[in-house]
């Protein structure tokens, strides 16, 4: 119990240090990018920190497995370097007990990453899209010049107003031409204003006392509808809607989907907690070093394996979404290969014969005999 608390304290200390450095680099890089967007006028300055916070929440799912891996690697590496691990082994505290403590710590972080990946990250993605849509819609109508025809964002239609009321929000003599899958629609109204749905976050143009002209090619003309109040939904661009539907959809909805991009997203979300356990297990044998061995020799090897592992996951996700290989293969082959690497590292650490005896005793007896 004392050893477990000591290892936990060492790992948490290193995790705090690595997390602070990674977040500082990550936040600084994206903060500069969002500031440039605000300077260009594509993003309001008041929303920079809000979008940065949502983006950080969604990115922690990807960053935390690597941070946990580095924390365990650095903590155990220091114990080997300062000969504390040798002292533990002399007292009868061997690698199996260290491994048991690391597994408990890894399971705890895997549960946290599962919550982030399956629940928090989709929510943060949805909030980020809503804030960006609101900013884009507000920016679109913030610079409306009365008396001029202007094209709406994404080529959705043409917009015109004759003037603004003294409050600066209510528009007079509104004209709107939009074309969608149902055909051509023309709206005219005496007044109009912008509104946002509190539940869905969609933006609407509310119109009062006007007419709607709908082109009906099969009937050979327009149909005219008069209304006292009406609303027109201002939809985001097609690409943004597709990205939003996948990244921000609930995990339960993805599980019931048969579309390849959503299956790839579902497997990616489950891959994050799996990667925490695999990387934590791999860090234990990789942290082992000899007395005169270089301090960062194993660290560079471990980072190389982790980078290759994550690149393989991202490539697999893209290939699965495009239908390059079947869904049963998906991202799981990457985890399988890393699992084989982890088993090989432990077999090298304990010795192949001892490892075979512990895992497959019947195979060990066939090869080496029962003695």
Image (cartoon, grey):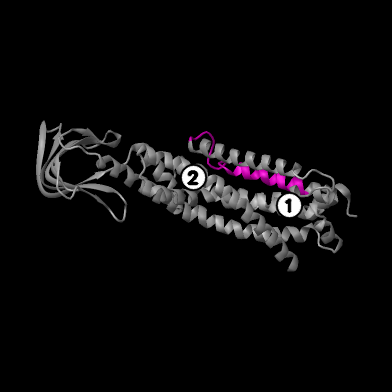
Tell me the distance, in whole angstroms, between the alpha carbons under discs 2 and 1: 30 Å
Neighbor class of circle 1 (other Cα within 10 Å; few <14, some 14-19, many 20+) is many
Q: Residue at x 42, y 39 (%)?
A: 36
Q: Nearer the viewer, mark 2 or mark 1?
A: 1
Q: From which residue to which does the magenta span run?
A: 322-346
Q: Is residue 4 positioned above or below 223 on the image? A: below
In the picture, the disc for residue 284 is 1
| Residue situated in front as seen by the camera: 67 or 117 | 67
Left or right: 257 in relation to 353? left
Residue 106 x, y percent position in the rendering: 64, 57
Q: Inspect this view and state whether residue 350 appears.
A: yes
Residue 73 x, y percent position in the rendering: 70, 50
Dot 1: element: helix
Residue 120 x, y percent position in the rendering: 47, 55
Circles 2 and 1 in contact, beta carbons < 8 Å: no
Left or right: 46 in relation to 211? right
Q: Residue at x 15, y 32 (%)?
A: 218
Residue occupied by mark 2? 265
Dot 2: element: helix
Q: Residue at x 38, y 41 (%)?
A: 38
Earlier in the chain: of badge 2 and badge 1, it is: 2
| Residue situated in front as seen by the camera: 324 or 316 | 316
344 drawn magenta: yes
Q: Residue at x 64, y 38 (%)?
A: 308
230 drawn magenta: no
Residue 146 x, y percent position in the rendering: 16, 38
């Amino acid at each position: 119990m004392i050893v477990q608390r000591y290892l936990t304290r060492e790992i948490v200390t290193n995790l705090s240090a690595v997390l602070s450095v990674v977040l500082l680099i990550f936040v600084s890089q994206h903060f500069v990018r969002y500031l440039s967007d605000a300077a260009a006028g594509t993003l309001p300055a008041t929303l920079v920190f809000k979008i940065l916070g949502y983006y950080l929440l969604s990115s922690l799912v990807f960053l935390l497995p690597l941070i946990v891996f580095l924390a365990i690697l650095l903590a155990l590496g220091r114990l080997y370097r300062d000969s504390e691990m040798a002292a533990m082994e002399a007292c009868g505290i061997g690698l199996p007990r260290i491994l048991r403590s690391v597994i408990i710590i890894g399971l705890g972080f895997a549960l946290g990453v599962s919550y982030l990946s399956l629940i928090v990250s989709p929510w943060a993605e949805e909030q980020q899209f809503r804030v960006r849509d609101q900013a884009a819609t507000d920016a679109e109508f913030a610079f409306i010049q009365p008396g001029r025809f202007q094209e709406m964002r994404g080529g959705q239609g043409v917009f015109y107003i004759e003037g603004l009321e003294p409050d600066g929000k209510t528009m007079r003599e509104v004209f709107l031409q939009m074309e969608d899958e149902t055909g051509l629609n023309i709206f005219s109204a005496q007044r109009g204003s912008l509104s946002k749905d509190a539940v869905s976050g969609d933006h609407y143009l509310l119109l009062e006392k006007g007419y709607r002209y709908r082109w009906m090619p099969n009937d050979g003309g327009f149909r005219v509808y008069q209304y006292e109040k009406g609303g027109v939904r201002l939809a985001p661009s097609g690409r943004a809607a597709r990205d939003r539907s996948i990244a921000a959809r609930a995990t339960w909805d993805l599980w019931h989907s048969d579309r390849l991009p959503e299956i790839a997203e579902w497997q990616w979300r489950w891959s994050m907690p799996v990667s925490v356990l695999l990387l934590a297990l791999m860090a234990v044998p990789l942290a082992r070093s000899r007395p005169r061995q270089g301090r960062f020799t194993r660290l560079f090897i471990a980072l190389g394996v982790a980078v290759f592992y994550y690149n393989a996951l991202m490539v697999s996700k893209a290939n699965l979404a495009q239908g390059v290989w079947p869904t049963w293969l998906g991202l799981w082959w990457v985890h399988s290969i890393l699992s084989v690497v982890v088993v090989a590292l432990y077999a090298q650490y304990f010795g192949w014969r001892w490892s075979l005896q512990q895992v497959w005793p019947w195979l060990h007896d066939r090869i080496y005999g029962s003695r």
